[in-house]
Image: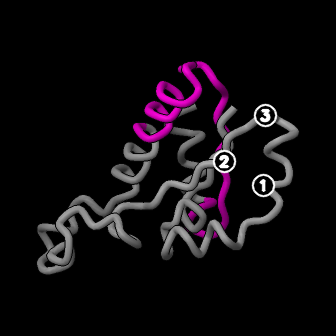
Amino acid sequence: AVVSTQSGHYAGEGDIEMFAQNTGFIFDIAPVFNAAVVFAEHRYYGKSLPFGNESFSDWTKTQYLTVDQALADYVENVKWLKAVYLNSSSAPTITFGGSYGGMLAAWMRIRYP
């Protein structure tokens, strides 16, 4: 299983390391479910700047900062992780988060059941 976190935790509101260091219970329950815990950094946050230091230089470069893009990125990350580390495209995936991350987790469930 892949237990993954969404923005806010999927670092949609800040640096991914800060969120990972302040998430306790998921690391406690992951072994019970034989699960991998994954934190994916939201594009345009932390070090995930698609155009480097120019990412916010003009509005045309922020056109990729959308919920749809964030969800699509996350789907691709999960597919890759399942293929490379789990050798199983059918492994269950659970997403969670709070604040913006909670919204992304809910939209993920609706858009990519």
Q: Over which residues does the magenta segment extend? A: 76-102
Give residue 89's mark. Answer: none
Per the image, the residue denoted by label 3 is 34
How crowded is the residue under tag 2: few (<14 C-alpha within 10 Å), some, or many (20+)? some
Label 3 or label 1, whichever comes before in sequence order: 1
Label 2 or label 1, whichever comes before in sequence order: 1
Between 84 and 45, the one nearer to me in the picture:
84
Q: Amino acid at mark 3?
A: Asn
Per the image, the residue denoted by label 1 is 27
Q: Amino acid at mark 2?
A: Val
Horizontal arrangement in the rendering, residue 31 relative to residue 60 (left or right): right
The answer to whether the residues at label 2 and label 1 have Cβ atoms under 8 Å apart is yes
Q: Quadrant of residue 66?
A: bottom left
Magenta-colored stretch includes residue 74: no
Q: Mark 1 falls on what kind of element?
A: helix
Q: Quadrant of residue 23?
A: bottom right
How crowded is the residue under tag 3: few (<14 C-alpha within 10 Å), some, or many (20+)? few
**Residue drawn at 44 percent across, 33 percent down:** 80
Q: Quadrant of the C terminus?
A: top right
Q: Is residue 64 above or below residue 84?
A: below
Q: Amino acid at mark 1?
A: Phe
The percent position of residue 32, horizontal first and vertical second, equals 87, 39
Q: Mark 2 falls on what kind of element?
A: strand
Between 96 and 106, the one nearer to me in the picture:
96
